[in-house]
Amino acid sequence: MKAVEFKNISKNFGNFPALTNVSFGIESNSVHCILGENGAGKSTLMKILFGMYQSDGGEFYIDGNSVKFDSPHDSIGMKIGMVHQHFMLIDDFTVLENVILGNETTTGLKINFTEIRSVLNDIINKYNLELDLDSKVSDISISSQQKVEILKLLFRDSGILIFDEPTAVLSPVEVKEFFKIIDEFKRNKKTIILITHKLNEVKLIADRVTVLRKGEVVYEEDIIDYNIDLEKLAQAIVGESRVSIAVDKSSENLTNETLIQLNSINLSRNNVKILDNLNLSLRKGEVLGICGVEGNGQNEIAEIITGLEKDFTGDFKNNNVNVSLVPDDRINKGMIMEYTVGENIYLKNGRKFIASSAILDDFSDKTINEYDVRLTNNKASLGSLSGGNQQKVIISREISAGNEVLIFSHPTRGVDINATAFIHSKIIEERNKNRAVLLISSDLDELVSLSDRLSVLFKGKIVKTFDPEELASYRSDNKISLTPDIEIKKEKDNQLFELLGKLMIGMAD
């Protein structure tokens, strides 16, 4: 029986057709992946299912019954839950307070915390969520915050669980843990819908996949015994016969000139050690990759280099260079949602130009053309764009400043194949212009492909740095693929990823 069935769902935003006659079904007790480029309509369709948007045409069914949701309250009442790509949590609340907010169990006029705590602990133990109900959300890792969102759904006894880019914020180790939780959901007769861009993950976890392109269903397939043609799937997503693009990393102007130097850096917050005697150097004309499980000090390194964090000890030298930052959270740290493309670009260049309409239009037109930003018109707000197009605008702004040092923090998180390829090419292009690039990412494929040197961070320390020769020994040549998800990893790749995984959790010798 189908848990969810869409029939001819259409949705327009102004004159833009976000969805056109979308029809497909999702079987009960299955994992159904929905793929597509940024702007293909995936999130729009799920927001219709969750009651955040209302369709302009068509209908959908839950367990065979036609339904219409006017708000998320209606969908929650039908046991549908959604974990958004950007979590809906209150940082200053505890785990328990976030979970029960809006869903309190009361005895008389009082919240029955004893009963709630007992129920939540039973759920935590059943699904191995490993959460402390009394921890503040601001004090726990990103992966734990995701588990809080999952706990919210389970507390409401949701039977249909929607996840929007759930692994975008997770390390490889955390992805494996997440998949174990998904398997446990299936064993408990739940239906899981995953929006993702990561094709290898589809192969590992999905029972069926649906591809949307430009708001229409273009491909559907059952996945049996992990068997699916990933290249065919990638072609369905982008609508092209060729999706793998190679970029030449060779450069004639590499130097050993150090632009950024961190020596014996120590940083603590709330009596917790964040950076522990950390040493790091960033050179002109290189990409230095930083990998590690989220929360091991990556963000703090970026904050020190950009001047946002000053409460540390040790020696920091930046040789009077200017720094640009593409932050890890584009919505909360990287842009003003209500501003246009031109206005967001102006934020970085305001000291050089007067904000006339002509200047803003020029900024907008250059970015739209050079970075292939797709929008209805150049007056559209950045909040109306897809995630990949938002990221292109932010990257354009930071690169256009012409600074000697560029920090990219999770630059392709939640971004589709083509946008990822484009962003990777821009990173290498800047490196080849003799700029120093610090690349912070949880995507090991991305790090290994793009980095000249690669440092592994664990508990605030650099535990290993791979030099160019070591990394080169794991590559077949110096041509890097910009769509690693559709390639079969060679044995050497797997050896390196296994070593990196062990180093990231402190298990390597």
Image: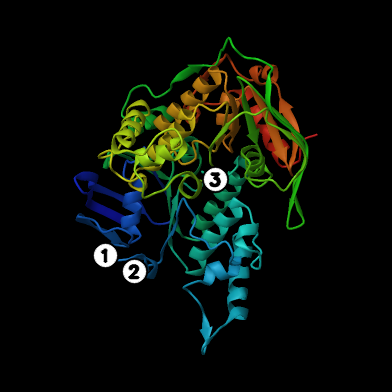
**The one of 356 and 145 positioned closer to us in this rendering:** 356
Going by the numbered disc 1, the residue's amino acid type is Val
**Disc 1 to disc 3, how far (Cα)?**
33 Å
Q: For the view shown, which residue lies furthest in the top direction?
A: 252
Disc number placed over residue 169 in the picture, else none: 3
- Residue 198 in sight: no
Label 1: few (<14), some (14–19) or many (≥20) C-alpha neighbours in 10 Å: some
According to the picture, the residue beneath numbered tag 2 turns out to be: 74
**Disc 1 to disc 2, how far (Cα)?**
10 Å
- Tag in front: 1 or 3: 3
| SS at mark 2 in the image | helix
Q: Earlier in the sequence, mark 1 or mark 2?
A: 1
According to the picture, the residue beneath numbered tag 1 turns out to be: 67
Rendered location of residue 83, percent (x, y): 46, 56
Rendered location of residue 85, percent (x, y): 46, 50
Q: Earlier in the sequence, mark 3 or mark 2?
A: 2
Going by the numbered disc 3, the residue's amino acid type is Val
> Residue at (44%, 45%) from the top-left corner?
335
